[in-house]
Amino acid sequence: MKTLQLLSHSKRNEKGKIYTYYSIAEPYWDKKTKKNEKRIVLYLGSLPDETAEQLRRFLKLMNAKKDIIVTNAEDIIFGEHWRYLDTAFLNHLWGQWGLSKIFPYSENKDVQTSDIAKILSIYRCLDTGSYLSAVGWFKKTALNIRVVAN
């Protein structure tokens, strides 16, 4: 069983200025006094508030009973992203209104006229532009997955 460790601090007032000193401590039960006590494992001295907060987070992570994945903002921010919710909503409305039934189905076409009409209609609703720029826009959305799936 791993030992729980915490960041302990003490404050001292010297010449009107308050100094905060930090140490890493582990709690234990003192059988003689029948009280919770703490044993200093490592004295750290005075630390900037930001460093002390980072140490608190690290010790919290070390003491966690569950598996925790450590990451940073660069790992979470996506380099590429697709438009999804707005296109999914309009795609749903298109299907709910049955607009694809207006266009005849053709077996000898790779892409159906109804799919092209759907893409261009959604494009017109969200980002107006030329027919040629619609191709580039389409690749930046989740429609290329949604249209194939439907």
Image (cartoon, grey):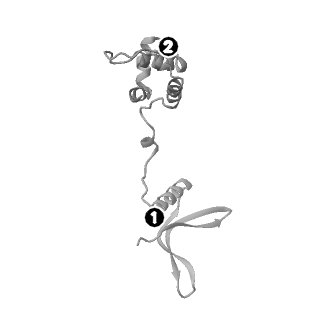
Q: Secondary structure at mark 2?
A: loop
Question: What residue do we see at 61% from left, 66% from top?
Answer: 11
| Cα separation between marks 1 and 2 | 54 Å
List the residue tagged with mark 1: 65
Q: Residue at x 51, y 60 (%)?
A: 56
Q: Position of residue 111 (x, y in %)?
A: 36, 18
61 left or right of 32 in image: left
Q: Amino acid at mark 2?
A: Gly
Which of the 4 image quadrants contains residue 16? bottom right
In the rendered image, the vertical position of residue 66 relative to residue 94, given as above or below: below
Relative depth, front residue between 54 and 44: 54
Q: Residue at x 56, y 78 (%)?
A: 36
Is residue 126 shown above or below 45? Answer: above
Secondary structure type for disc 1: loop
| Mark sitting on residue 129 | 2
Residue 74: x and y in percent read 43, 41
Contact (Cβ within 8 Å) of mark 1 with mark 2 = no
* Residue type highlighted by circle 1: Lys
- Percent position of residue 19, x then y: 60, 63
Q: Residue furthest left?
A: 108
